[in-house]
Image (cartoon, rainbow, N blue to C red):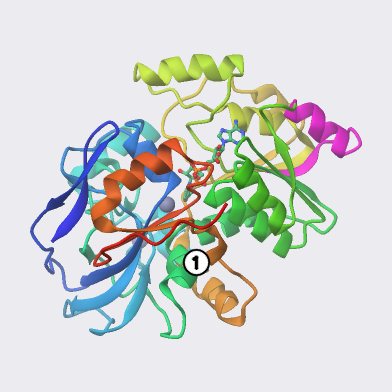
Amino acid sequence: MRALTWQGTQDVQVDTLEDPGIVNPRDAIIKVTSTAICGSDLHLYDGVIPALKPGDILGHEFMGEVVETGSASTLRKGQRVVVPFTISCGGCFHCKITQFSACENSNPVEKQDASEMLYGYPMAGIFGYSHLTGGYSGGQAEYVRVPFSDVGPIVVPDHLDDDQVLFLSDILPTGWMAAENAEIQPDDTVAVWGCGPVGLFAVQSALAMGAARVIAIDHYPQRLALARKLGAETIDFRNTDVREALMEMTGGLGCDAVIDAVGMEAHGFAIDNMLDIAKQKVGVGADRASALKQAILATRPGGRVSIPGVYGGMTDKFPLGALMEKGLQIRTGQTHVQRYMADLLAKIEEGTVDTTFLISHRLPLEDAAHAYKCFKEQQDSWTKVVLKPGMTTPDAPRAG
Ligand SMILES: NC(=O)c1ccc[n+]([C@@H]2O[C@H](COP(=O)([O-])OP(=O)(O)OC[C@H]3O[C@@H](n4cnc5c(N)ncnc54)[C@H](O)[C@@H]3O)[C@@H](O)[C@H]2O)c1
Ligand SMILES: [Zn+2]
Ligand SMILES: [Zn+2]
C-alpha cells in the first residue's frame, strides 16, 4: 500500500509499504477514503514531539470502509466508519468512566516507559503519533489496522459525505470538549487563542453552548475571517495588545473563560516566546507556551482555563501566581473522542453542526508531502487539508 511516512524533521514522503493485517481478534482493517492533516501533525513534522522513528506512518484523523475484521470485531465488511484518534480498550478503569484518552491498555507495555518517565504515567495509544503513544501506524495511508474496533469506530450513514463526518475523528470533538472544559455559562465572554481548526470548532461549540460573546485571537486574516463568519469578534495579535484589548472589551473585568487552541508552537515575537523558540530549537524540551500565559493573565478572577492545545515537555516563566491568586480552574487533555462521537454525529445529521466550511484543500494521498509543507508554511489559506487515497487530481482550493 501507499502511505505517508516521517523521515526526519520537516521531511515526510509517500512510500510503498506492506498492507496491514489482523493481529488481534478485536482488530479491523479499514480502507481509508479520507484522512486529514492536523495541527498536532505539525508538532511531529517539526520534530518537537519525541520518539518518532524514520519510516513511521503518520495520521490520526481518518475514515473509510471496513475491509477485514478479526473474530471479535463488531464491525462488518463494507461498513463506512470514522475512527477516533484515541485508541481505547473500553474495559479499563479510565475507559469505563469515559476518560478514553487515558486508556491503560492501548499503549503496549514495551512502549510505556518513555511517557511514564516524562509524565509520571504512561499515555494511551494514539494512531500515528510516535512511540510515546504506542507506535501505531497512522491513517495517512491506503489501509490501516484499527485495534479495539468494537469500541472506537462509529458507523456513519451513507447519505452523509466524508467531508461532513471526517472531523468526528478528532478536531470536532476536540473543539467541543474544549468548550465543555471551559464550563460555559450564558452571558459568558469567552476568548479563544488560535483560529486553526481546533480554535474554530471551539468558537462554534462555545456559541452553541450559549456563550454571549466569543473573541477569537490569531494573526492570519483568512482564519480570523472564518471566526467572524461563525459569530466571533476577533483580535489580530500582530497589531493589537491582546490583554489590553480584552480588558477593554470586558469593561476591565477579564474573560470568564479562555481556551488555548494554540499549543506548544506559539507564534509571535513576545520576549518570552523568542526565548522559548530558541530553547525548543536546541531540543531542551521547552514548550512555547506564550498564548497560554497570555490567556491566564486575561482571565477574570474565578474564571476557567481550557487547554486543548498540545504540550509535550516543560515550560518556564509560567504565571503560577496569577493562576493561584485569581483562583482559576484549569481543564485540559487529549480528547476523550469516543465520549462525543455519537452526539456530534446526531448534530451533524440534524444540521446544527457543519464541518465542511473548514476544508480549504483536497488532494491525492500521493501529494501528502507537498500538503504538509503548505499546511506548515501557508497556514492562512491552508486551513484544513483532506488527503484522499485513490484521488488523482487535486480539487481546486476553496476561494479565499
Ligand atoms: N487535545 C487534543 O486532543 C487535541 C486534538 C487536536 C489538536 N490539538 C492541538 O490543538 C492545537 C491547535 O490545533 P490546530 O489543528 O487548530 O492547529 P493549527 O496549527 O492549524 O492552528 C493553530 C493556530 O494558532 C495560531 N497561533 C499561533 N500562535 C498564536 C498566539 N500567540 N496567539 C493566538 N494565536 C496563535 C496560529 O496562527 C494558527 O492559526 C495544536 O496544539 C494541536 O496539537 C489537540
Ligand atoms: Zn488531530
Ligand atoms: Zn481502556
Residue visible at 46% across and 71% down in the picture: 165
Q: Is residue 256 magenta?
A: yes
Is residue 320 placed above or below 258 in the rendered structure?
Answer: above
| In the depicted structure, whether residue 267 falls above or below residue 390 | above
Camera sees residue 331? yes
Circle 1: element type: helix
Which residue is at the far right? 251
Quadrant showing the N terminus: bottom left
Residue at the (43%, 36%) spot, across then down: 377
Which quadrant would residue 362 be assigned to in this image?
A: bottom left
Question: What residue is rendered at 63% in x and 41% in y?
Answer: 221
- Answer left or right for 145 relative to 278: left
Q: Which residues are magenta?
A: 241-258
59 with respect to 318 (left or right) = left
Q: Which residue is mark 1?
A: 339
- Location of residue 150 by image quarter: bottom left
Above-or-below relation of 301 to 187: above
Query: Taking 383 as reference, is 221 above or below it?
Result: above
The residue lying toward the viewer, choosing from 365 and 138, is: 365
Q: Amino acid at mark 1?
A: Arg
Q: Residue at x 35, y 32 (%)?
A: 46
Q: Is residue 235 left or right of residue 285?
A: right
Percent of width and height locating residue 214: 75, 50
Q: Left or right: where does residue 13 sit relative to residue 187?
A: left
Q: Nearer the viewer, residue 366 or 11?
A: 366
In this rendering, the count of numbered labels is 1
Q: Is residue 120 visible?
A: no
Count neighbours of disc 1 (C-alpha within 10 A) and say few if under 14, some if 14 to 19, many if 20 or more. some
